[in-house]
Image (cartoon, grey):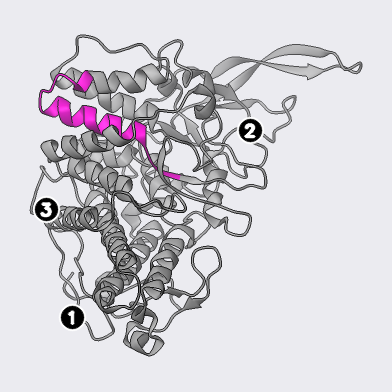
Amino acid sequence: MKRYITYTKVFVLLFALGLTSCELDTSPTDAIEKKEVFKTVSGSEKVLNGSWGQLMETFYTYANPGFGSFLRTSDAMGNDVVYQTNKYGFGSHYQFNALYGKGGTNTHSWSLTYKTINNMNNILAYIDDSQGDAGDRRRIKGQAYALRGFMYLHLASSYAFAIDKDPNALTAPIYVQPTTANSQPGKRATVTELYNQALKDLEEALVLIPEGYARDQKFQIDYNVVLGLLSRGNLYARNWEKAKEYSDRLLAKNDYLMNEAEYKAGFNDANNREWIWGHLQTPDQSDASYQFHFLDVTSKDSYYYSFNADPYFKDLFDEGDYRKSMINWAPDPSADIEKTGVVWMRYGKFKFKAGQIADIVLMRTSEIYLINAEAKARLNNGDAINKLNEVKRARNATLATNLSGNELLEAIWIERRKELFGEGFSLVDIVRNQKAVVRKKYEHDKIEYSYVVKDEEGREITKTKLMTANGHYALNFPDKSPFVANSPYYLYQIPNVEVRENPNL
């Protein structure tokens, strides 16, 4: 089976044993009726769960571990991640070579996104006639709409500039029916049409998924996840009233913000009360955990420890903010401290669990607070600063006062950078707000670094040495032009293989 997907090569992936133990069926959609998988509600749910597993666990390369690779790409291409040199993975993204080249992550993104969309289209085409519990049928139908809407939101926010720059900019095709080898290839939809499709699907999901549905695991899409996606999607689409409405509704149901101990626990456990949505990992299913080899920059278990912080990023945090205490100069976790002479600014936010596994966070309550704050700031609603300060208060940061208009919006965006570092929002925020990437070379070549060693008698001795301090080194685009707003370097590209196969693109 080829790693890429085109309109002539669409496969439905059927998983016979659910999310944790899967048998992959690569029969084309023409053969679905022979399989009869969609004749029952339970069969449709297996396709739903299997599609989720495929989306989150499929590797294109080791640098592309499922949907999480798109989140890592967004942060690597932003302001605040300094990608450690000579480390495998996202270095070309950090230097703006990856997406613009139309390969790698582009191919992976296109393939996973449209495979997932087609699987959801098959569920939606057959679910009404399936045998089984009517309540389950309605809920699964809603979850299929939600997952399809999530995919169209990814396309809308990654393959086009901000909707207010050009509402009619062409992006990617929309498919709402199952596709086969004989299907007519789609034309590119506008960014407005993509956002409309995403929000329409999510609205339908909100109607179908019962508010009282109690999911078994946090990867399953429940009512609150849909409220969160509608909050996020409407913010990106600049529907301020809707973003406010849905985030208000979600915060009325779930306003918990984690405490300091929870924040410092490693961002690796979906049982965290602030996590609204996350992808779970087990010793038997842990491919997505590979992302922590990039994110975890303080553990010896990590291979690459490459998502380090810009030294100037630390300056954004107030004294007393416990997040600031998690950002410090340090050498490689595996380095011999006596022999190395190099340090990077390590943000100890992400840490492996034992056994090199870690759950992947997809949505937290703090994001919803900041969506609510931004939407209200756009609407000149005085509660905006209160919602911003709820997040600041939870992190022991200095509260904002006397802010309004653009100053308040800038404060909210800075708080998003601080709070959501490494969670996949950096480039998306830059694009949707028509900003330019901002990076500055660190002005100090050397810093005085203190460390503790033990002498021959086991006594601890503090030593100090001058170390080379690393900050940003990719300070412009590959063609040496300066970072600007609305650059094509920021956007995902339709893969060359897809352009060749679909004449309508």
Query: Does residue 425 appear to the left or right of 3 in the view shown?
Result: left
Residue 192 numbered mark, or none: 3
Q: Main secondary structure of the magenta part?
A: helix
What residue is shown at x 22% (from left), y 54% (from top)? 202
Q: Nearer the viewer, mark 1 or mark 2?
A: 1
Is 290 drawn above or below residue 144 in the view shown? above
What residue is shown at x 31% (from left), y 53% (from top)? 100
Q: Amino acid at mark 1?
A: Gln
Q: Amino acid at mark 3?
A: Thr
Question: Which residues are drawn in magenta?
Answer: 361-385
Viewer can see residue 175? yes
Q: Residues within 10 Å of mark 3 (few under 14, many from 20)?
A: many
Please give the residue where the numbered disc 2 appears in the rendered image: 332
x and y percentages locating residue 270 in the rendered image: 49, 43
Q: Quadrant of residue 117?
A: bottom left
- Give the distance between the C-alpha atoms of the residues marked 2 and 3, in whole angstroms: 45 Å
Mark 2: which secondary structure? loop
Q: Quadrant of residue 251?
A: top left
Query: Does residue 120 appear to the left or right of 441 in the view shown?
Result: left
- Give the distance between the C-alpha atoms of the residues marked 1 and 3, in whole angstroms: 22 Å
x and y percentages locating residue 35 in the rendered image: 40, 86
Please give the residue where the numbered disc 1 appears in the rendered image: 184
Task: Please say if the residues under marks 1 and 3 sit with CB atoms less than 8 Å apart.
Answer: no
Earlier residue among tags 2 and 3: 3
**In the current view of this chain or complex, which residue is farthest to the bottom?**
34
Residue 365 covered by magenta stretch:
yes
Is 182 drawn above or below residue 89 in the view shown? below
Query: Does residue 148 appear to the left or right of 34 in the view shown?
Result: left
Mark 3: which secondary structure? helix
Q: Amino acid at mark 2?
A: Asp
Q: Nearer the viewer, residue 154 or 278?
A: 278
